[in-house]
Amino acid sequence: MKLRFESLSDDSDELWPSDMEGRFMLSWILISGLIGSLCFPLAIYIIGFTFKGVMGSSPASRFQSYHYGGETGGCFSCCQSLGTKLNTMAIIGFIIGAISGGFVAHEIYENHH
């Protein structure tokens, strides 16, 4: 069995072979999705929405007291509910990250291809 190695010619301006686009895109999508699944729940927690409700002295509690008082509604209530569901936040974060990573990978690949 003989192994044959072919080198890219110097006149080729491709950074990646065209058959690598799928792998390149998939790796960006997966890595970005994993980062999103960690960062999105962390951001929601930092804002002040926790599994126990709105955290005292947080940006969310200050917003609630200024705009809503004791009765909330709309997006604020959705964020309160979301803060109690770690799995849902991780899935939403993965989706946001994966979509963002896909766009970034596409732009990188197209601009350097």
Image (spheres, grey):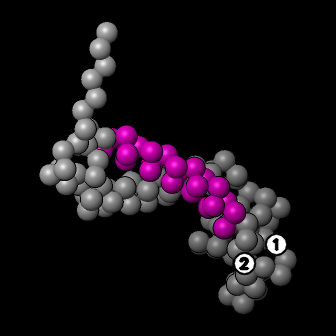
Q: Is residue 28 magenta?
A: yes
Residue 60 marker: 2
Q: Do residues under tags 1 and 2 come within 8 Å of each other at their CB atoms? A: yes
* Residue drawn 70% across the image and 53% down it: 85
- Looking at the rendered image, the quarter that the N terminus falls into is top left
> Which amino acid, by three-letter code, is at mark 2?
Ala
Mark 1 residue element: loop
Q: Is residue 72 left or right of residue 32?
A: right
Nearer to me, 61 or 29:
29
Task: Give the extent of the magenta segment.
Answer: 21-43
Whichever of labels 1 and 2 marks the residue nearer the N terminus, that label is: 1
In the picture, the quarter occupied by the C terminus is bottom left
Give the vertical position of 69 relative to 10 (above or below).
Answer: below
Relative to 26, 75 lies left or right: right
Q: Residue at x 83, y 61 (%)?
A: 52
Say which quarter of the image contains residue 73.
Answer: bottom right
Q: CA distance from mark 1 to mark 2?
A: 7 Å
The residue lying at 38 percent from left, 60 percent from top is 104
- Taking the spot 23% from the left edge, 42% from the top edge, the residue there is 8
Where residue 24 appears, as percent x and y from the top left, is: 37, 46
Residue 3 vertical position relative to residue 25 in the rendered view, above or below: above
**Residue bearing mark 1:** 55
- In the rendered image, residue 112 lying in the magenta stretch gets the answer no
In the image, is residue 8 above or below residue 89? Answer: above
